[in-house]
Image (tube, grey):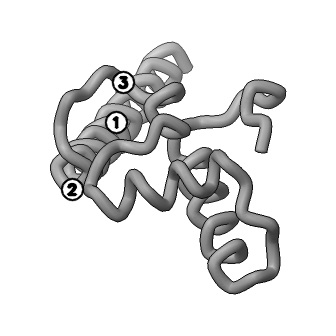
């Protein structure tokens, strides 16, 4: 998998790499070195290097990293809703 060729988000990378790993474990896809490294990292609870390339800096173990990532994504959703709310109100005042 060459993720450098596309502009993907971290969540896209996580989803696609886990889907590929699942296919490889079922025997539907050849287990590449990247997928093997992903599998080994998941087994020991370490942030996979494949994800780390696209991630914010973190020294947390995998479980804590995922919890932190979920909280960050939830926070960004709230911020986005607030910004949209105030941005739309600016247009109502002008009219």
Judged by depth in the image, the label closer to the viewer, 1 or 2, is 2
* Residue at 55 percent of width and 20 percent of height: 95
CA neighbours of label 2 inside 10 A, class few (<14), some (14 to 19), many (20+):
few
Residue 87 at x, y = what percent?
A: 45, 23
* Vertical placement of residue 2 versus 43, above or below: above
Secondary structure beneath dot 1 equals helix
* Residue at 30 percent of width and 47 percent of height: 46
- Dots 1 and 3: beta carbons under 8 Å? no
* Vertical placement of residue 33 versus 80, above or below: below
Q: Is residue 68 left or right of residue 43?
A: left
Give the mark, 3 or 2, whose residue is nearer the N terminus: 3
Which one is in front, 63 or 11? Answer: 63
* Residue at 52 percent of width and 26 percent of height: 53
Which one is in front, 16 or 40? Answer: 40
Secondary structure beneath dot 2 equals helix
* Residue at 62 percent of width and 66 percent of height: 21
Judged by depth in the image, the label closer to the viewer, 3 or 2, is 2
Q: Quadrant of the N terminus?
A: top right
Q: Distance of mark 3 from mark 2, alpha carbons?
A: 15 Å
CA neighbours of label 3 inside 10 A, class few (<14), some (14 to 19), many (20+):
few
Q: Which residue is mark 1?
A: 76
Give the mark, 1 or 3, whose residue is nearer the N terminus: 3
Q: Which residue is mark 2?
A: 63
As drawn, which residue projects farthest toward the top? 94
Secondary structure beneath dot 3 equals loop
Quadrant of residue 29 in the image? Answer: bottom right
* Vertical placement of residue 39 versus 5, above or below: below
Q: Distance of mark 1 from mark 3, alpha carbons?
A: 14 Å
CA neighbours of label 1 inside 10 A, class few (<14), some (14 to 19), many (20+):
few
Q: Which residue is mark 3?
A: 56
* Vertical placement of residue 82 versus 4, above or below: below
Give the mark, 1 or 2, whose residue is nearer the N terminus: 2
């Amino acid at each position: 998998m060459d993720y450098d060729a596309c502009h993907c988000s971290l969540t896209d990378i996580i989803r696609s790499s886990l889907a590929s790993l699942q296919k490889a474990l079922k025997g539907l896809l050849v287990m590449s070195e990247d997928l093997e490294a992903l599998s080994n990292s998941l087994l020991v609870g370490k942030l996979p290097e494949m994800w780390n390339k696209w991630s914010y800096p973190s020294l947390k173990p995998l479980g804590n990293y995922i919890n932190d990532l979920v909280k960050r994504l939830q926070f960004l959703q709230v911020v986005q809703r607030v910004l949209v709310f105030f941005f739309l109100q600016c247009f109502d005042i002008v009219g």
